[in-house]
Every structure is written in structure tokens, then in C-alpha cells.
Image: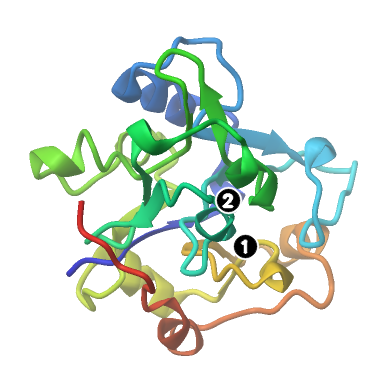
Amino acid sequence: MANYGMAFDYELCIDCHACEVACKEENGIALGMEHRRLWIQKDGDIEGDFWNIDKSSVSFVQMQCQNCVNPPCLEACERKAIYIDENAIVRIYKDKCDLLLSCMKACPYDARYIDDTHFFTDKCIFCADTRLARGETTTACQITCPAKLRYFGDLNDEESEIVQMLKKRDFFVLKESEGTIPKLFYFIPKNKEFAQKTIEKGTKIYTWGEMKPKIQPLNLKKI
């Protein structure tokens, strides 16, 4: 069984939005639609307890569904339309969604949105129904990023590129206090001044050895 996650070397982001364009093309989302599956937030737009706004520099953070081990959207859905699949990706049964929006309200990352074509709440699912379903092992956003700042793969595979990087670099997760246990990881910038400007004091810094026991998936259910 795979356990997919993603990591970001956010220091390298040049705000080109190639990842957003690739994601929209891969998933049939109209170009120009904002806040769909993934998006880039500039420092002045970011909310939360992890980001320290500093106007002397411009920085960007990659935002999308955090593919939580303990997803609050799953618990909030009374129709049991949300589940965790065999790849440990948080998914939805589209025909069961009643658009009560309880999942959207429960998500502390504002990651879900209404697909107004098919009428269900959608989000990033790591290209599970497109690229992964075709046997590919990369996401559209990862393979398109010119800065190569995204790492994607099986967290259960010690030889995977993402695990190898997580072993080399310290990192943090977003809104840890929510208890969601995200599987999106943000590498500590190599530039110490940049790190001080973009990471709030008190943020928990992890090594892979500390994080690995936390991210074993719960509530697995096959499609």
C-alpha cells in the first residue's frame, strides 16, 4: 500500500504559476479560475500561525489540500462521502456529496471548493484519478515546476525521492495545532535570513525520524 505525500522547497518559488496552469489543464478546470485544487499565496495574503509577514522581501507558499492523516472534512461529512483510498489519499464519492458544505467549513486550510459543473466539493487529490490512475508516479504540478521545488511520492518507500529529501532536510507543517497531521511538508530554507523572515518563532521543526511515526494512514477504505 502506498502512502502519498508532497514536500516543498518553498524558498525556490518564482511565482510563475506554472503549477496552477498544469493542474487546471490536467483536471479540466478553466484557466483563470482562482483557488482551485492548488494556488500560490504571497506573504501579504497568508493567514495562520506559521507565517511571519515581512515586507522587506516577497515570498510565496504553495497551498492545497494537506492530505491529512486525520482529515476534519471526513469527520464533518454526515453523508460519509469522504474517504481515504488505498494510496492514503483523501477522496470523495461524488454521487454522495449533498453540498451541505460541512467539509468546506471544517477544513482549516480552505482547501475545498465547489465544482459547479459536477456539483460536489472538490480539492487536490494528487492527480489520483488521472496521472496515478494511468500508472504515472508524478503529479502535473510537480513535473511542470521549472524551479523543481516540489517533491511527490510514496512516504512508505524509503528509496523514494521525497523520503530521501525528507531525510536530508528539516521541515515544518502548516497549522499543526489543528491536529490534522498534514502530509505536506515545507523544507526549512537554506538561507537563514529568509527562514527567519518566513517562519514564526515557536514553529515545530521536524526531522524525518520524528515525523515518520505520525503519518501512518487511518480509516483506509478502497474505492
Q: Name the residue type under label 1.
A: Pro
User: In front here: 59 or 209?
Assistant: 209
Graded by Cα atoms within 10 Å as few (under 14), some (14 to 19) or many (20 or more), the crowding at tag 2 reads some
- What residue appears at the point 43 percent right and 52 percent down from the top-left corner? 80
Q: Position of residue 177 (x, y in %)?
A: 73, 72
Q: Which residue is mark 2?
A: 10
Q: Is residue 192 left or right of residue 12?
A: right
Instruction: State the colouring used for the structure image.
Output: rainbow
- What residue appears at the point 44 percent right and 31 percent down from the top-left corner? 19
Q: Residue 13 lies in what quarter of the image? A: top right
Q: Name the residue type under label 2.
A: Tyr
- Can residue 213 be seen? yes
Q: Which residue is mark 1?
A: 189
User: In front here: 70 or 141?
Assistant: 70
Q: Is residue 55 left or right of residue 220?
A: right
Label located before the other in sequence (1 or 2): 2
Q: Furthest residue to the left?
A: 135
